[in-house]
């Protein structure tokens, strides 16, 4: 069993980005600039956004964090988005999800200029990704594709089983893995809450991607010997022995599954850091205007 170490690879890629930024600045170009909009005080969202902003500093990007109260109206949030769309100093921006219930996610995501949509959530980017055209790839699937690529995990002809069909992880993951590219060329099975015989489907996987948000769901009996297992789950479990008051749990029962695997991602330190790195890669691309939507 070998670890797909997202923390280490994320650091390597951040170093590569930092070098490119230094070269851009030496050439008289300005630094790439990412903005993040955070609505309300959700603890997990705060942590993710802080990590995104800190990573910007690490690679030499400018960053702006816009905080809005939980009670902000949809109209006011749309106004903020229009300002970011029109601000030539901002290369790309994200609106951290989840949003409060009184705000429609799709109304917000569709208001983002696709050229600045570094989360890759706008229908234009989703459509371009599906057609294999240049686009911003959603950060989590992009990070997983980068892990598979840089660690040399063979995907061509492999059976990939994806657990979870969310719009930001499972569905785009299934599209990227099935594309005619490297990595890609998998036969993909996309599973969800209505799938029958899930353990039997999982046992067919050469590559198993768990993105359900159910801690410890994937057990050893569901994994074929030699499979590569990617754990997207990051559920917070209350734990009084930790200074933070919680620990993170993946969707995979790591200790029992790892010995059966060819490759496996740890939680934390696997997919999570790659997600942040992918957002930086998209922002770098945005600053170079290489994706024209
Ligand atoms: N919430 C959970 N994952 C994400 C993400 O990748 N982007 C944004 N904007 N919000 C999220």
Image (spheres, rainbow, N blue to C red):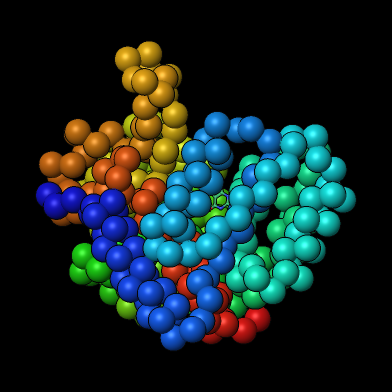
Front one among 86 and 96: 86
Res. 110 image quadrant: bottom right
Percent x, y of residue 275: 43, 55
Q: Which quadrant would the C terminus be assigned to in this image? A: bottom right
Res. 40 image quadrant: top right
Front one among 197 and 109: 109
The answer to whether any part of residue 105 appears in the image is: yes
Percent x, y of residue 247: 37, 27
Q: Is residue 269 left or right of residue 175?
A: left
Q: Look at 30% across and 45% down and name the residue there.
A: 269
Q: Is residue 173 left or right of residue 226?
A: right
Q: Look at 49% across and 84% down and name the residue there.
A: 28
Res. 176 image quadrant: bottom left
Q: Which residue is the extreme one toward the right?
A: 75
Count of all numbered marks drawn on residues in the image: 0
The answer to whether any part of residue 192 appears in the image is: no
Check the image and report above or below for 180 versus 80: below
Front one among 66 and 98: 66
Q: Look at 55% across and 31% down and name the residue there.
A: 43
Percent x, y of residue 270: 31, 49
Q: Look at 53% across and 76% down and name the residue there.
A: 30
Check the image and report above or below for 193 versus 78: above
Percent x, y of residue 107: 79, 56
């Amino acid at each position: 069993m070998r670890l797909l170490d997202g923390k280490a690879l994320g650091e390597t890629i951040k170093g590569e980005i930092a070098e490119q930024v230094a070269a851009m600045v030496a050439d008289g170009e300005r630094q790439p600039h990412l903005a993040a909009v955070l609505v309300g005080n959700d603890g997990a969202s705060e942590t993710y956004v802080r990590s995104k902003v800190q990573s910007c500093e690490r690679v030499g990007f400018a960053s702006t964090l816009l905080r809005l109260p939980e009670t902000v109206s949809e109209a006011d949030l749309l106004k903020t988005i229009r300002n970011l769309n029109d601000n030539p100093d901002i290369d790309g921006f994200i609106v951290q999800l989840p949003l409060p219930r009184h705000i429609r996610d799709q109304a917000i995501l569709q208001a983002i200029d696709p050229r600045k949509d570094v989360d890759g959530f706008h229908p234009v980017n989703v459509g371009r990704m599906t057609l294999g055209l240049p686009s911003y790839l959603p950060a989590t699937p992009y990070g997983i594709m980068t892990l598979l690529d840089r660690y040399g995990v063979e995907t061509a002809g492999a059976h990939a089983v994806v657990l979870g069909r969310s719009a930001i992880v499972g569905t785009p993951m299934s599209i990227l893995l099935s594309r005619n590219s490297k990595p890609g060329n998998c036969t993909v099975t996309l599973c969800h809450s209505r799938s029958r015989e899930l353990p039997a489907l999982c046992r067919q996987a050469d590559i198993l991607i768990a993105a359900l948000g159910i801690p410890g769901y994937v057990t050893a009996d569901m994994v074929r010997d030699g499979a590569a297992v990617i754990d997207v789950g990051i559920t917070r479990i209350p734990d009084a022995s930790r200074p933070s008051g919680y620990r993170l749990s993946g969707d995979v029962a790591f200790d029992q599954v790892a010995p059966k695997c060819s490759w496996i991602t740890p939680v934390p330190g696997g997919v999570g850091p790659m997600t942040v790195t992918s957002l930086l890669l998209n922002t770098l691309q945005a600053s170079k205007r290489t994706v024209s939507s």
